[in-house]
Image: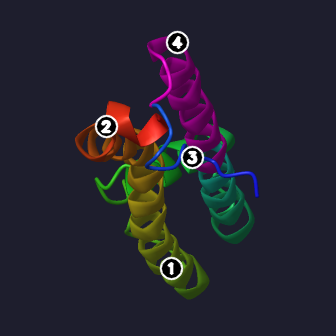
Amino acid sequence: MNAIYERHHERPIDTAAFARRLLTHGAIAMVLISLSLAIGMLGYTCLEGMTGVDAFLNAAMILGGMGPVKTEGLSEAGKVFAGLYALYSGLAFIAVMGLMLAPVIHRVLHRFHWSERAED
């Protein structure tokens, strides 16, 4: 079985490999954020007829947790989309934070539980 992280009886990876692991997790997080932003922009463009810049601004503000810029004059469909997108954005935030913190937490816990004697 090929595990993503080293097991408790294995030596922790070196600093360069850990940096590569962090960069990989960061790249995956950026893909998730980019796709989420694209979904928001597509929804605002299709449902509300916003320009690309306005759709980007509203989607980015919701995805960043600040709330939408434009709330007045939205159609019913636009309001429902904004609400669902805000709920999705909260879950996406939790997923991205988990993705970014997982290698760090694993490394800290691994250091506490690994001992030199385990490899003998």
- Check the picture and name the quadrant holding the N terminus: bottom right
Q: Label 1 crowding class (10 Å Cα cut-off): few <14, some 14-19, many 20+?
A: few
- Image spot of residue 116 (x, y percent): 35, 31
Q: Nearer the viewer, mark 1 or mark 3?
A: 3
Give the residue at the far top of this rendering: 16
Are discs 2 and 3 less than 8 Å apart at CB? no
The amino acid on which the numbered mark 3 sits, given as a three-letter code, is Ile
Identify the residue under disc 3: 33
> How much space separates mark 1 and mark 4, taking CA atoms?
40 Å
x and y, in percent, of residue 24 in the image? 62, 31
Most common secondary structure along the magenta stretch: helix
Q: Residue at x 46, y 46 (%)?
A: 9
Which residue is painted at 44% across and 79% down in the image?
Answer: 83
> Which residue does the numbered mark 4 point to in the structure image?
16
Of 68 and 2, nearer the camera is 2
Nearer-the-camera pick, 105 or 1: 1
Q: Which residues are magenta?
A: 12-33
From mark 2 to mark 1, how far is it between C-alphas? 47 Å
The kind of residue tagged 4 is: Ala
Q: Is residue 67 visible?
A: yes
Residue corresponding to mark 1: 84
| Residues at marks 2 and 4 touching, judged by CB atoms closer than 8 Å | no
- Residue 87 found in image quarter: bottom left
Residue tagged 2: 115
- Against 76, residue 17 (above or below) is above
The disc, 2 or 3, on the residue closer to the chain's N-terminal end is 3
Residue sitting at the far left = 112
